[in-house]
Amino acid sequence: MSNKKTKSKQKAYKVLLVGDTSVGKTSIILQYTKHIHPNIYLSTIGLDFASKEQKLENGEEITLRIYDTAGQEKFNSIVKNLFKSCQGLILVYDITSIQSFHNINNWLNYVKDNSNKEVKLLLVGNKSDLEDKREVEIIDANNLAKKFDIELIEISAKDNIGVDDVFIKIAKMLYYDINDTEVNDSVNLTQDEIIRNNPSSSCCNIF
Ligand code: GDP
Ligand code: MG
């Protein structure tokens, strides 16, 4: 009998951060993964991702593969595919920018039409350290969250307040609610797809 242990493959989930430019998406990801180097840099296709293992309360670990998109890019087909294939979506606004909050409605509409039906959503108000510049009242954000039946968290990527909570929360939602997930360690983008979808490198700038 072999005593070689076969390590079961860890569950991996794709999580995408969306929201207007400057709301703090990159800062949130960097704060969460600060001890880790993003393991792939796909700047020419306008997508970056970082992977991090997240421990759950039952002791199990899952992998979160976190993607960043810019707010003003023209969505190319890779980004559209990512919208369809990601299981978690974090919608980010800046509490000091009412415009970024209003645009959450546009993001939600886009999500409704373009993401998979199982997708787990979380609404995040960033820059809570800038209370004196607040433009988005928490009651309004709560109302929006209720309307769409999603959870709201206010955080500060700068002061590292609530950032881990965002990812712990989405990790739990994914682990407990999504049965059918990719369990291997690959991204669903082949080199062919990257070339096919991106004849030029002008699509978008992210990070
Ligand atoms: P992105 O365009 O959504 O990726 O936003 P960035 O992460 O590049 O952040 C835009 C600007 O907001 C940068 O100057 C950040 O330093 C700043 N920023 C991000 N998060 C916070 C925060 O929680 N508090 C404050 N005060 N500034 C932040
Ligand atoms: Mg960015």
Image (tube, rainbow, N blue to C red):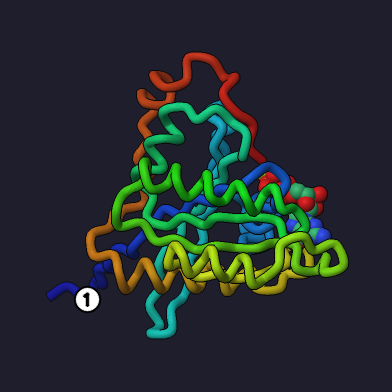
Residue 39 seen in render: no
Q: Which corner quadrant holds the N terminus?
A: bottom left
Task: List the single residue furthest toward the bottom.
Answer: 58
Residue 70, placed above or below residue 50: above
Q: Residue at x 51, y 53 (%)?
A: 66
The percent position of residue 62, horizontal first and vertical second, equals: 40, 67
Task: List the single residue furthest toward the top.
Answer: 199
Looking at the image, residue 200 sits to the left or right of residue 148; the answer is: right
Q: Residue at x 55, y 27 (%)?
A: 74
Q: Nearer the viewer, residue 11 or 121?
A: 121
Residue 197 seen in render: yes
Task: List the single residue furthest toward the right.
Answer: 132
Q: Which residue is mark 1?
A: 3
Total marks in image:
1
The percent position of residue 59, horizontal first and vertical second, equals: 40, 83
Residue 32, placed above or below residue 176: above
Looking at the image, residue 166 sits to the left or right of residue 20; the answer is: left
Residue 9, placed above or below residue 162: above
Looking at the image, residue 25 sits to the left or right of residue 186; the answer is: right
Q: Nearer the viewer, residue 89 or 107?
A: 107
Q: Nearer the viewer, residue 79 or 1?
A: 79
Q: Residue at x 48, y 73 (%)?
A: 169
The percent position of residue 22, horizontal first and vertical second, equals: 73, 46
Q: Residue at x 34, y 45 (%)?
A: 85
- Label 1 element class: loop
Q: Which corner quadrant holds the C terminus?
A: top right
The percent position of residue 102, horizontal first and vertical second, equals: 62, 50
Type of amino acid at the residue the image marks with label 1: Asn
Give the quarter of the image for residue 136: bottom right
Looking at the image, residue 120 sits to the left or right of residue 67; the answer is: left
For label 1, count other residues whose C-alpha is less than 10 Å away and answer few (under 14), some (14-19) or many (20+): few
